[in-house]
Amino acid sequence: MDVALENVQVKNMLNKAEEKFISTLSRQVQKQIGQFTTPQNIANYMSDRLLEKNLCQKHSTFKILDPGAGTGVLGISLVQKIFSINSDAIVQIVSYENDNNALKVLRHNYKLISKWAKNNNLKFTYTIKPQNYILDGYNLFDYGINNHENEYDLIISNPPYKKLRKDSEEAAAMSFIVHGAPNLYGLFLAKSIIELKPKSNAIFIIPRSWMSGSYFTKLRHFIFSQGNISEIHSFKTRKNKFGNAKVLQELVIVVFKKKSEINQIRYFTHNSISLLNKTNYIMADKANIVVGKEQRIYLVNSKKDIETLKWANRFSSTVENSGLKMKTGLTVCFRNKSLLEDEGSSENVPIIFSDNISKHSVHLNRKKGQFLKKKRNGLLQNNQDYIFVKRFSSKEEKRRIQTAYYNSSRFSKYDQISTDNKLNFVIAENHNLLKGAYLFLSSTKFDEYYRLLGSNTQVNSTEINTMKCPSKQQLIELGQKYDAQRLESMEQSMIDKLISNI
């Protein structure tokens, strides 16, 4: 029996209810509640990727969780898919939603599907829980998470994307995975994984930031303590139409398998969120993809990306272990406008901005605000050689890592300088080490390497410090061959040739 939702009247009623709900949500309201409704094509694709057809054919009973259900698009799609594979299945779905407007539509939609199932002699039941998913049974972890893992056979989720205070009730309830500023989607991810049965699958569409961000270190450790990721789907553009809103965060679809040994991850790359299909995938060894004590996860799209990771993983050290340290610029200028001056004097110092960087060198060419009054010692640093790295770039720019060698001898009349907060700077244990590090960080190969980790267009100093790097001695031997003036004028092709020979 073909039990797909082909009843035009039912489909139209579902779509109209969804469209009416979406029209009531302004961009501001969506951000406040952290809710971006899932388009139907994404829901269908996620259901396809979540289900193993042989599993549907063997198992007759499925208990599904859809936390943060919204209007139920994901859950309904999954129910439809299960019955299209196995019409004899017994399907129960539990959906959480605590937004009153979404709840009305959710109840309406499940009544329609329940009626459809009854008319087709399908065994379907549903439970709607109008509670905060994270706080429902907030003390359930007091006696150990393993007491709560045999709840669900399948989980499908588009959780809320919303930053929380560290002292929020939700963060307190899930304190074992909170590190720094938490985001609600990370808490949903962790709690869902806890409630998933061993050997079972879950699928999520979430921002990419959890894969490398420092605030998500505990979450990554927890995820890999509970199982493994089998698939990651990414999109070539960040400008994704999601419901009636443009979601500018870089999103990924992640398939997780509970308490299963997986040594390789399948990577799918799609042109956009509106053009989902079963594209070809590449296989990547988990050992090359999940790296370091932070267990950061690299995002690869091609065999070339895998080769780049293999290249990086051959280095025995990290940036920090090689005697280097990247820091963020000291002066937040919008908070210190009163200290900025246009002309240099004995009472101020030059402050270096991103736009002072051009072709790997620094030029004090700002007409306004190029100098900072010497009134706050915490904003001042020694005038010595540095590597400067722009913190921000656009996704379309050719390079994410944009560097300059700051040759302090060119600015020897100053004892101190300052740096704008939108600039990173690198310090080293000695001069030759700094010069060698400049060549490494300025190489095209390192830029390609960082792009596999960086979850946005901001160059994160914490991430850089943990990345693979030649040893201290290798960098010193490289740096001692060139003086600062030569580095400032060195062509990119020459830099790339030097690094390829390490």
Image (tube, grey):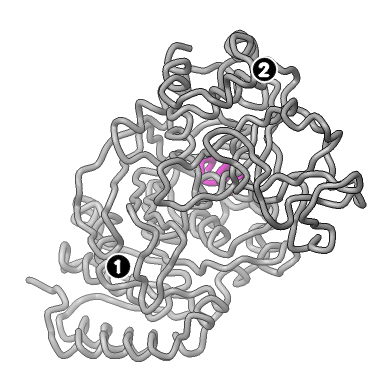
User: How far across and how far down the image is residue 252, in percent?
Assistant: 39, 54
Q: What is the number of the mark on residue 66?
A: none
Up-down relation of residue 14 to residue 144 (above or below): below
Label 1's element? helix
From which residue to which does the magenta span run?
217-225
Q: Is residue 459 left or right of residue 155?
A: right
Of 245 and 371, the residue lying toward us: 371
Give the residue at mark 2: 433
Up-down relation of residue 21 to residue 320 (above or below): below
Q: CA distance from mark 1 to mark 2?
A: 51 Å
User: How far across and how far down the image is residue 343, in percent?
Assistant: 79, 52
Q: Is residue 314 in view?
A: yes
Residue at horizontal 52 percent and vertical 38 percent from the top: 401
Q: Is residue 296 magenta?
A: no
Question: Which secondary structure dominates the residues rendered in magenta?
Answer: helix
Count of numbered circles on the image: 2
Q: Amino acid at mark 2?
A: Leu
Give the residue at mark 1: 43
Of 98 and 267, the residue lying toward us: 267
Which image quarter holds the N terminus?
A: bottom left
Label 2's element? helix
Quarter of the image for residue 263 reads: top left
Residue at horizontal 51 percent and vertical 89 percent from the top: 100
Residue at horizontal 38 percent and vertical 46 percent from the top: 199
Is there a contact, CB below 8 Å, between mark 1 and mark 2? no
Of 349 and 213, the residue lying toward us: 349
Up-down relation of residue 247 to residue 339 (above or below): below
- Front position among marks 1 and 2: 2
